[in-house]
Image (spheres, rainbow, N blue to C red):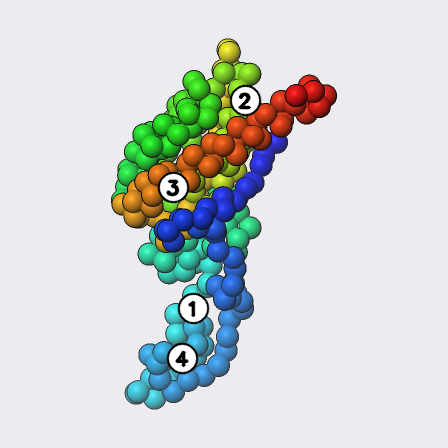
Amino acid sequence: MTKLRYLAIVGCGVVGVAVGRGPLAESSSTRASVTRDCDAPGAARGATCASDSGRLRRVEASSPHTADTPTDPRSARYDATVAGRILSLSPAELWEREPRDDTFALPREGFFHRRFVELLTQLVPGAAVENVECRRATCVLILSAAVEDASQLDAALGFIPFGDRFVTEASELESDRTRLTVHVSVNREHMDQANVDAWFETWWAERWGLARERYDRDRAAAAEAADGGVP
């Protein structure tokens, strides 16, 4: 079963909740108004207009879902969380359509292999990040842990701020390990790894202890429920 979740991350304003559609969800219909100046800011895309020479020419058509929009992974304005909402795509589907951008990918992969796994193993001893591959603003992680820790591995992801929107795919058992595939997207404001690292250190110092306490309480409650309510 696939689980789609959002990380509500509270901190110093660098990492936060994924934004919604808002005014970015423009209509894809072509407007047909006419303007005197084809190069004016208000010139309608796809419209026929008069140039200075008096000849009619066509303004190059564009779609809000193609070039130079938050939904186009080739655009500087690309925002994976906005694209996911407007196009109704999961992080896994976004990852498939994104090209690789080393400016984002290399430092974010380093974060997952170092800081992220450090905290993950504090919650789930023996857990490992087997592989990470990031592209434009979405990453896929292959995590593993002992079979008996499968539920812990999935639950732990809700206590570590590692992205804005993520989906976990069904675990597959291999030998005595369980493997979890995670696709995670970040919004445009959170793609600068230096800013994220600075925020993360503050979060770790101020909130990691509280996160661990809540995680331990949740685990104890789940274990009690599994034992039929006997503490």
Where, by quadrant of the figure, is residue 121 drawn? Answer: top left
Q: CA distance from mark 4 to mark 2?
A: 56 Å
Residue ID at (33%, 56%)? 76
Residue ID at (33%, 29%)? 113
Q: Using the image, tell me which numbered label, if any, was put on residue 206.
A: 3
- Look at the image and tell me whether residue 74 can be seen: yes
- Looking at the rendered image, the disc whose residue lies closer to the viewer, 3 or 1, is 3
Upstream in the sequence, badge 3 or badge 4?
A: 4
The amino acid type, in three-letter code, at marker 3 is Glu
Q: CA distance from mark 1 to mark 2?
A: 50 Å
Q: Position of residue 206 (x, y in %)?
A: 38, 41
Q: Using the image, tell me which numbered label, if any, was put on residue 42.
A: 4
Q: Using the image, tell me which numbered label, if any, was put on residue 150.
A: 2
Q: CA distance from mark 1 to mark 4?
A: 14 Å
Q: CA distance from mark 3 to mark 4?
A: 49 Å
Q: CA distance from mark 3 to mark 1?
A: 50 Å
- Looking at the rendered image, the disc whose residue lies closer to the viewer, 3 or 4, is 3
Circle 3 SS class: helix
Considering the image in quadrants, where does the N terminus appear? top right
